[in-house]
Image (tube, rainbow, N blue to C red):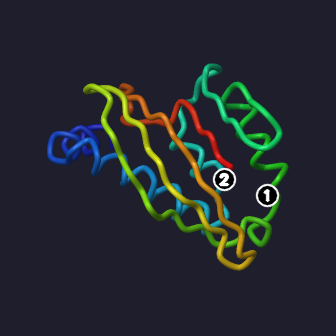
């Protein structure tokens, strides 16, 4: 699997790789699979999420918060990302702006993500969602 990733990484632009991470997150979310959704984030105690309740530090805590807030597939609703803007900040970092929509709840908001290139590909190291 890693060799397939390395082959694709050699072919895809950083922007395309980041879009692929986001597409995988949407697919996982819409299946009700929070664990796979979270693979878009770096599994690190330094990963941060900022939202309406303040700053959450650490991958494990961010995952726990998602599981608490969205305990079932029904609670997760159907996710869509739109208005994506990807800006590279050097060769190993990117800033992503976008909009999320939870379709059935008619709930939407905006997010800013900071991605970092890691040995396992592009990962979110900071998420600010409102």
- Provide residue 38's location: percent of width, then percent of height: 59, 44
Mark before the other along the chain sequence, 2 or 1 = 2
Q: Quadrant of residue 93?
A: top left
Looking at the image, is 106 positioned above or below residue 123?
below
Q: Position of residue 98 (x, y in %)?
A: 49, 54
User: In the image, is residue 101 above or below residue 65?
Assistant: below
Residue tagged 1: 70
For disc 1, the neighbor class at 10 Å (few under 14, some 14 to 19, many from 20) is some
Identify the residue shown where x is 71% and y is 69%: 107
Q: Is residue 112 left or right of residue 12?
A: right
The quarter holding residue 96 reads top left
* Disc 2: which residue: 34
Number of marks: 2
Secondary structure beneath label 2: helix
> What's the residue at 76%, 32% (across, down)?
61
**Horizontally, is 7 left or right of 73 in the view?**
left
Asked which quadrant contains residue 92, the reply is: top left
Apparent side of residue 75 relative to residue 10 in the rendered image (left or right): right
Residue at x 38% of width, y 32% of height: 120
The residue at the far bottom in this view is: 104
Residue 28 x, y percent position in the rendering:
56, 60
Mark in front: 2 vs 1: 1
Q: Which quadrant is the N terminus positioned in?
A: top left
Q: Residue at x 57, y 29 (%)?
A: 43
Q: Are marks 2 and 1 in contact (CB under 8 Å)?
A: yes
- Disc 2 residue crowd, few under 14, some 14–19, many 20+, Cα 10 Å: many
Provide the secondary structure element on which disc 1 rests: loop
């Amino acid at each position: 699997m890693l060799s397939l990733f390395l082959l694709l990484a050699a072919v895809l632009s950083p922007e395309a790789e980041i879009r692929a991470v986001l597409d995988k997150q949407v697919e996982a979310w819409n299946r009700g699979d929070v664990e796979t959704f979270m693979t878009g984030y770096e599994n690190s105690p330094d990963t941060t999420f900022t939202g309406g309740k303040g700053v959450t530090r650490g991958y494990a805590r961010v995952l726990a918060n998602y599981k608490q807030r969205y305990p079932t597939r029904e609670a997760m609703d159907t996710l869509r990302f739109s208005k994506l803007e990807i800006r590279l900040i050097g060769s190993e970092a990117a800033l992503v702006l976008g909009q999320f929509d939870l379709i059935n709840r008619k709930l939407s908001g905006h997010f800013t993500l900071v991605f970092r290139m890691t040995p396992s590909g592009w990962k979110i190291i900071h998420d600010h969602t409102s």
